[in-house]
Amino acid sequence: MPDDGGPRPFRTEITDGMRIEWDVPIEMDDGTVLRADVFRPVTGPAPVIMTYGPYAKGLPFSRGYPSAWEAMARDHPDTVAGTSNRYQNWEVVDPEKWVPHGYACVRVDSRGTGRSPGRVDPFSPRETRDFHDCIEWAGTRDWSN
């Protein structure tokens, strides 16, 4: 069955030295459920680095934007050093570089993009409220400090 980009059931695994939670549901104040991937240390609470946006959290940067990836790798080789880059998306933090230093990385597909339903409306009050709600959600998790 082809992947239609819609939400998948939440799942979790421990791999590459991280606990990864895929497609975590985050309910917004209007009942819409956005989806996030959470990369965190296997044990203990961690400070959170959150990214929120339309650039498909499940699409590796190197595959989705090959010319931009090649330019970044050429001009900034430190970004590709010491990592498999399997979890690197667009121009956001690479969990393989941050989680080993005790951080949790949360990536949220904004409303209407990736695996989050709705209508995309960049830089709108709705998007700002959604990002606020995601930050508040992360602050209530037992793995967040």
Image (cartoon, grey):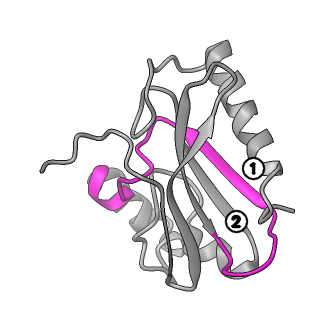
Q: Amino acid at mark 1?
A: Ala
Q: Residue at x 60, y 24 (%)?
A: 31
User: Can you tell which quarter of the image residue 99 is in?
Assistant: bottom right
Query: Left or right: 134 with respect to 35?
Result: right
- Which badge, 1 or 2, comes first in the chain's sequence? 2
In the rendered image, residue 87, in percent from the top left (x then y), is placed at 45, 66
In the rendered image, residue 30, in percent from the top left (x then y), is placed at 64, 18
Residue, far left: 1
Magenta highlight range:
40-65
Task: Relative to 11, say whether 121 is above or below.
Answer: above
In the rendered image, residue 28, in percent from the top left (x then y), is placed at 65, 28
Q: Which sits in the foreground, 42 or 94?
A: 42
Q: Is residue 109 visible?
A: no
Q: Amino acid at mark 2?
A: Ala
Q: Quadrant of the C terminus?
A: bottom right
**Crowd rating for badge 2 (residues with CA inside 10 Å; few <14, some 14–19, many 20+):** many
Q: Which residue is mark 2?
A: 104
Q: Which residue is mark 1?
A: 138
User: Can you tell which quarter of the image residue 78 is in?
Assistant: bottom right
Task: Relative to 100, say whether 94 is above or below.
Answer: above
User: Can you tell which quarter of the image residue 86 is in?
Assistant: bottom left
Q: For mark 1, give the secondary structure.
A: helix
Query: Left or right: 74 with respect to 137?
Result: left
Task: Relative to 133, say whether 71 is above or below.
Answer: below
Does 131 appear in magenta? no
